Image: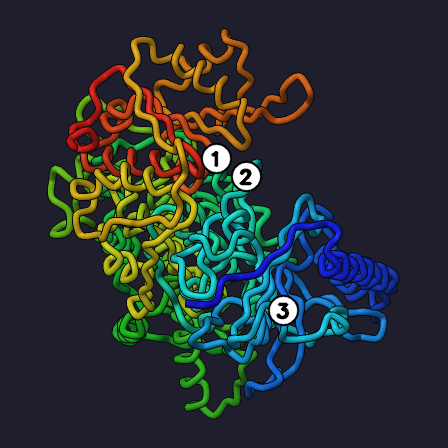
Amino acid sequence: MPSSPASSRSADDPTIRAEATHLAESRAALRSMRDETLALRAQGGNAVSTEVLHAAIQARAAALLDHPDVPLFFGRLDYSRDLPGEYRGERYYVGRRHVHNAGGDPMVVDWRAPVSVAFYRASAKDPHGLALRRRFGFSGGQLTAYEDEPLDGSAAGAALSEAALSKAALPGAALSENTRSGSASAGAAPSGESRILTEEIERPRVGPMRDIVATIQPEQDEIVRADLGESVCVQGAPGTGKTAVGLHRVAFLLYTHRDRLKRGGALVVGPNRQFLKYIEQVLPALGEVDVAQATVEELVSKGFAQRFAVRGVDDADAARIKGDERMAQVLYRALWANLAAPTEAVTVPRGVRKWRVPTSEIQRHIDAIRDRNVRYAAGRAMLAQRIAHAVLTRMEAEGESPDDRVQDAVARSRPVKQVVDELWPAVDPIKLLFGLLASAARLAEAADGLLGAEEQALICWERPGAKVPRSPAAARWTAADAVLLDELADQLDRVPSLAHVVLDEAQDLSPMQCRAVGRRCATGSATVLGDVAQATTAWAAGSWEETLRHLGKPEAVREELTQGFRVPRQVIEYAARLLPFAAPRLAPPTSVRQAAGGLDVLAVADVPDAVATAAADALGREGSIGVIAADAAIDALTKALTVRGVGHAVLGGEEPDDAEGETPRVVLVPASLAKGLEYDQVIVVEPADIVEAEYAEILGLRRLYVVLTRAVSALTVLHARPLPPQLAGR
């Protein structure tokens, strides 16, 4: 174990004054860097290049924007003069971005740089060449404390003289802060070894998720710094920081492979828009402002926005069938069933001659194209060119000298276009999907041997007592239909691949949804995040092996985070009572935090009144407050809070301001939207209702597990009905 850190919190401490001076000078240097960037004149060779340069300058300026309430650096590395290493005798301040002075000397090194690895991984057993690791405490952006951890066996602070405090550091690394780190480990454990680290983890959170660069742990850092070519799957228990790890990995990859990711693109996929809003400030705080974010529904509907709108909802059984991987083959059959066998030869006039290609040769071309396993639209274009090439070979045999321009002209000629339209017709994916779901006969033909008759009846619109829509515009399309449409679109013409995709809450995706995301990183890599114990959809793939296979990443490296910092120990142990029933194959999670008064389970007579009382009491303490209940109970709870004068917002609804124009601290959260969110104080309402609202009991228990683990400081469970026996049975 490392030596106990030495620390100071006195404003009169000369070290704090010196470090505060370095912070002020670093902020001034960052402002100068931004001013210099904005002073650049965009002047390209033409209007387009000028506009591109202007956009690049503005993007760079946005990345250099200082946030006064966010520490510019959070640690310092003093490399030993006596230990071997590349950075021997040097000193570095580790922060969220690189900052240099007017002379080009670095004042803060980026957390992603190689030199910063030691901040996260150094320990007494392996100091990574460090004599001292210093952590800084901040309040409102002001440096208020420091804590020294000697790693060479010397007394705290003995590594370098204070005269060298402001010595410039080489370009390097700094990680950001978030209260959701991974497992504790030697050298950076919050359990009593570092008060600053512990306080940062437990700092009340109001508003969006924060970054975790100041508190990231060694096992998390290894995931963050995994190579771009490597796909990684992280199974993470509640509070282990899996979401933050995924976001920080994107930031790291952008730092180390910026040109490649800029060309190929990076994308973060989340379960819903509320979740994406919650995490949207993490990457900008790390200086990365160009990473796209989308839900799966937004991703698959993007190309059809003007002609396709999700207006309906499938029941769980229908959604499960539509999400099954067998649907990919059903769609494939329906698409390729449009091909026809030639019945007449094609005759192409060129000048005074006519050139004939017989049906047998046309069929050979069709068969050859099919054997190449190309996309449907590509095959259609290839058929026109092959027929044209057959004409050219005949022309050459007769002594003519046609070139590629002649072949293109023949391919575009009326006779060739006509035969291609007859044999390999163009297909509108929306119309094809409509025809498949609106016709029992068509569906039966495409699904023969794949889906049973009962399964077909679940997804077909043509059934007894049902009204079949007359056109695609009249159809009540569902989210699962949008995924089928995306599958068809890819079978028609390949969807472009991005360089990297982060997929969060992946345990909830159906096989078909996984295929949709996998197409977006077919030639790139992925960071897959989730927790099998939190899988709450009827259509989920069921295991990481299945999920990764459907994503096209079976080779992904599997990592597991089981020890968390965010959820107090008594809360996670209470929630873990559900795991033997909800996810029996998973090891129970643990937590390094013990919060006094962190758990109250109260039987009440009047639930709405008890909720209003508990919310009003919670307002007397620091931090955010989440009231989580079954979706059907939200309206009644809204009325109860309003009657009692407790200002609140409803997640997924409008966000009203309170009397002072601020967003209310109390948020009513439908249980279906709670996943991935966190609140300092959580009030869970009627657990039995939450369980019974789901399609199956196991899914309800998993939903309740999610809800119970949203608390960072305190959990209050209010119930009038008996608790689910799996939760109460101890």
Work out whether 408 lies above or below 430: below
Given residues 305 and 675, the one toward you in this image is 675
Give the amino acid type for the residue marked by disc 1 in the picture.
Asp
Q: Is residue 256 visible from the viewing direction of this image?
A: no
Given residues 245 and 132, the one toward you in this image is 132
Under circle 2, the secondary element is loop
Check disc 3: other Cα within 10 Å, few if <14, some if 14-19, many if 20+. Answer: many
Sequence order check, earlier mark of 2 and 1: 2
Gap between marks 2 and 1 measured at Cα: 7 Å
Give the amino acid type for the residue marked by disc 2 in the picture.
Arg
Given residues 381 and 148, the one toward you in this image is 148
Sequence order check, earlier mark of 3 and 2: 3
Residue where numbered disc 3 is placed: 157
Residue where numbered disc 1 is placed: 680
Given residues 511 and 211, the one toward you in this image is 211
Q: Residue at x 36, y 46 (%)?
A: 238
Is 289 left, or right, of 609 in this rendering? right
Check disc 1: other Cα within 10 Å, few if <14, some if 14-19, many if 20+. Answer: many
Give the amino acid type for the residue marked by disc 3 in the picture.
Gly
Work out whether 124 lies above or below 138: below
Quadrant in which the N terminus is drawn? bottom left
Q: Position of residue 486 (x, y in %)?
A: 39, 50
Work out whether 716 lies above or below 494: above
Sequence order check, earlier mark of 3 and 1: 3
Residue contact at pointers 2 and 1, CB within 8 angstroms: yes
Residue where numbered disc 2 is placed: 205
